[in-house]
Image (cartoon, helix red, strand yellow):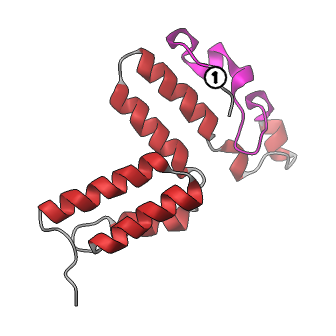
Amino acid sequence: MTTETMRAEDYPLASRCPERIQTPTGKPLNGITLENVLAGNVGPQDVRISRQTLEYQAQIAEQMHRHAIARNLRRAGELIAIPDSRILEIYNALRPYRSSSEELLAIADELENQYQATVNAAFIREAAEVYRQRDKLRKAQ
């Protein structure tokens, strides 16, 4: 990821600075054309948002004092590296009474260590504590 910081004036990115936007596979935004799709040069992974683009948007949100949106964009950026099937498993594990504290903490460790998803790991740890306080954890059998 580049260390270049976006400014509020750069929004919307696609029209103000499209040269800075790349797909997760490294294709430039201007390479996503109907012609390239029809020629087979653009696939499903090419039309997903990249972690870098979400970081750019988070920087813009912060400059506009929308810190909650910036946190959500960074959390979404971390999730890009995680397979969709695993995200669904984690989503189900976060439902009340579905997981023990230990299981949630193991998910947090996985996110942090395997995917470098530190923001999401902290979110899961916080959820485990809130579930403990509200008695929403799965009981041992």
- Between 129 and 72, the one lying in front of the other is 129
Residue sitting at x 54%, y 42%: 77
- Between 30 and 89, the one lying in front of the other is 89
- Residue 13 magenta: yes
Residue 99 seen anywhere in this rendered image of the structure: yes
User: Range of the magenta residues?
Assistant: 5-32
Which percent across, then down, holds residue 135? 12, 68
Residue 82 seen anywhere in this rendered image of the structure: no
Which percent across, then down, holds residue 40? 85, 50
Three-letter amino acid code at the position of disc 1:
Ala
Q: Residue furthest right?
A: 39
Mark 1: which secondary structure? helix
Q: Quadrant of residue 88?
A: bottom left
Residue sitting at x 43%, y 22%: 61
- Between 98 and 16, the one lying in front of the other is 98
Up the image or down, 78 lies above or below 67; here it is below
Q: Quadrant of residue 7?
A: top right
Image quadrant in which the N terminus is located: top right
Residue sitting at x 36%, y 26%: 67
Residue to which mark 1 is pinned: 14
Which percent across, then down, holds residue 49? 61, 40
Q: Residue furthest left?
A: 134
User: Left or right: 132 with respect to 45?
Assistant: left
